[in-house]
Amino acid sequence: NMSAVRVAFQSASDTMVIDSRTARLLELVAARPHAGGRGSEKASLFGLFSCRTPGGSRLLRQSLLQPLACRRDIEIRQAAVEALLNDEPLFYELQRLLPAIGDVDLLAARLTIEPKSRGPQWCRAAIRTAL
């Protein structure tokens, strides 16, 4: 079903945790600061990629700081990347459609927090707006 949304939980035991010092030294999400300034995100590994959505940016950051540790999960991700590389029209169609999806993570967070203070009508409107 093309309109279905699948939510999956990724256990911390399925990923490798990179401590903040190592992430800084490897310049994963921010380059080391020069002359006492702040490190630049653009000069880091994270900065080499351009994500189409805020959720994509968060997923990339998470993938760099907590890379997959399970061989099966790594191979599944590699197969997905290979499928996109082998189907250029699909790649460009996804690239065109992804920004229209909106920030699904933000919507999910709002729907778990806001319903206490807002009513069902607000939830329906939030979902319609996001979709």
Image (cartoon, helix red, strand yellow):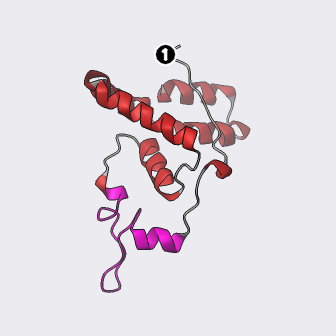
The answer to whether residue 87 is above or below residue 1 is below
| Quadrant in which residue 54 is drawn | top left
Say which residue appears at 42% left-offset and 48% top-offset: 57
| Quadrant in which residue 73 is drawn | top right
Say which residue appears at 32% left-offset and 23% top-offset: 90
Q: Compare residues 107 and 10 and report the one nearer the observer.
A: 10
Label 1 amino acid? Met
The answer to whether residue 110 is above or below residue 120 is below
Highlighted range, magenta: 20-47
Q: Compare residues 83 and 97 and report the one nearer the observer.
A: 83
Q: Is residue 122 left or right of residue 39?
A: right
Q: Is residue 44 left or right of residue 119?
A: left
Would residue 29 be counted in the magenta stretch? yes
Query: What element does badge 1 sit on?
Result: loop
The answer to whether residue 38 is above or below residue 36 is above
Q: Compare residues 41 and 24 and report the one nearer the observer.
A: 24
Judging by the rendered image, the residue that carries numbered circle 1 is 2
Say which residue appears at 73% left-offset and 39% top-offset: 116
| Quadrant in which residue 30 is drawn | bottom left
